[in-house]
Amino acid sequence: MSATLLSEGAVVSEALGYGVTVLYIVAFSLFIYGLMGLTGPKTAVRGNWIAAVGMGIAIVATLLGVYNSAGDAGVPAINWVLIVIGLAVGVALGIPPALKTKMTAMPQLVALFNGVGGGTVALIAWAEYIEYHGFTTVPDVPSVHVIVGSLFAAIIGSVSFWGSLVAFAKLQELLNKNLERKLVAAAKGFQLANIVLAIVAIGIAVYIGVKAGAGDGPTPWFWIVGLLIAAGVMGLFVVFPIGGADMPVVISLLNAMTGLSAAAAGLALNNQAMIVAGMIVGASGSILTNLMAKAMNRSIPAIIFGSFGGGDDAAAGGPGAAGGTVKATSAADAAIQMAYANQVIVVPGYGLAVAQAQHAVKEMASLLESKGVEVKYAIHPVAGRMPGHMNVLLAEADVPYDSMKEMDDINGEFQRTDVAIVIGANDVTNPAARNDPSSPIHGMPILNVDQARSTIVLKRSMSSGYAGIENPLFFADGTSMLFGDAKKSVDSVIEELKAL
């Protein structure tokens, strides 16, 4: 009887093992299919839900796999109560900010969630390593993939966690402006410190790995803590000196690092879903980071080790250094210019996001189109505070995706455009990037709004953009400034258009 039961148990266990594998395949297939849906605003929500279902299946498969392996080894069943509590806490902490966060603060939320992911991966990696070796008096000898995967995940996950927290603080403007400028100015000092910290972290990781591979007793706690501290401080020091104009690239890079650390942790855990999902995030984040860096005509090392933005205004020229006269305009004049134009190009920026003016801009564009004016939207790759920030905002207001033109596709249009209306964009329209070799952003591709017959800039004031660099566009002969809150200004233009 007992032999029969054991045989049946083995069959059930084997079947459950195959079932877990099938569930993992289904899960990461849904990850990939969901990611494909994120290529356009019409399918993005559906793609997000598909990927979420895939993650749910992956969680179920992981729990079944752990339960199955625990039974085979004779180890007590996993504590389902703790798992349920953990899931409940995660849901309680994750859903409210996702629902309540405004679009203007979405980059901060992305940075924070990404940081939490990196920190979680680091903790999982250490938990797996400690289970094999860590603090036990008679340690097991972990395999090479456990050693390398857990140590790599711990280092990269820690860097991503602490770096993302700094990115969040910068985007949320929690850092004092003077302090932030001093941090940016001290970039070279941070570079040297990062080299030292990287050597320390790698050296400790090699020591721990060799000690574990040789089965030479448990790892002393201070080595593990030292590695975590070195990696964490390096994460802080990597992002501290990076200026505001580079922040979208940094967020993308940190996201890629979190993905790679997740893949490494999956390797240590022998979890196929983590490996595939981590590689998808790591690969897509790396590609996006590279594309954005190229869009800024800068290399990724130049961004990490020699960032610009957030510096002293005096270094950027100071107020009025561009020369020329600022010409203010009114909503009535702006409406007349656009109503009698053949083509108008809208250039959105972070100011549009702050004012939540996307719906008003869509209404203004619809009025212009009803008068026979062709309206297009020019999207710079690093406009806003994160990749795709402007696309998301405009899609929220039901702006047709075909009307959103990338920089390379729209720049040739400005010379035959009657009116370019810049709403809150600053650094991505700065002609100093093209004309001034002494400018910190020289060489960065920009939207050629200064080539339009007329340019109308909507801004609250003459203050510089997030990069801390003055924009000569504001003083150009063909530029007029419509001062005020972007949404109120656009609403005023709408009323004038209705009266024409």
Image (cartoon, helix red, strand yellow):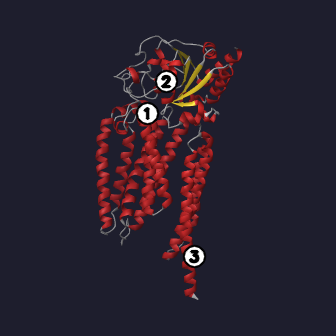
| Residue 412: numbered disc | 2
Residue at image position (44%, 11%) is: 324
Q: Is residue 8 left or right of residue 239?
A: right
Identify the mark nearer the N-term, 2 or 3.
3
Point out the tag, 1 or 3, that comes first from the N-terminus: 3
Which of labels 1 and 2 is toward the front?
2
Q: Nearer the viewer, residue 252 or 79?
A: 252
Q: Is residue 63 above or below residue 200?
A: below
Q: Position of residue 72 (x, y in %)?
A: 50, 76
Q: Is residue 398 left or right of residue 58?
A: right
- Element type at mark 3: helix
Residue type indicated by callout 3:
Val
Circle 1 residue: 295
Give SS at disc 2: helix
> CB under 8 Å between callouts 2 and 3?
no
* Quadrant, the C terminus: top right
Report x, y in % for residue 293: 41, 36
Q: Going from the N terminus, do you reach mark 1 or mark 2 first?
A: 1
Identified by mark 1, the residue type is: Ala
The residue wearing badge 3 is 12
Q: Which mark is residue 495?
A: none
Q: Which three-letter amino acid code belongs to the residue tagged 2? A: Gly
Above or below, 161 against 491 in this view is below
Q: Residue at x 31, y 53 (%)?
A: 202
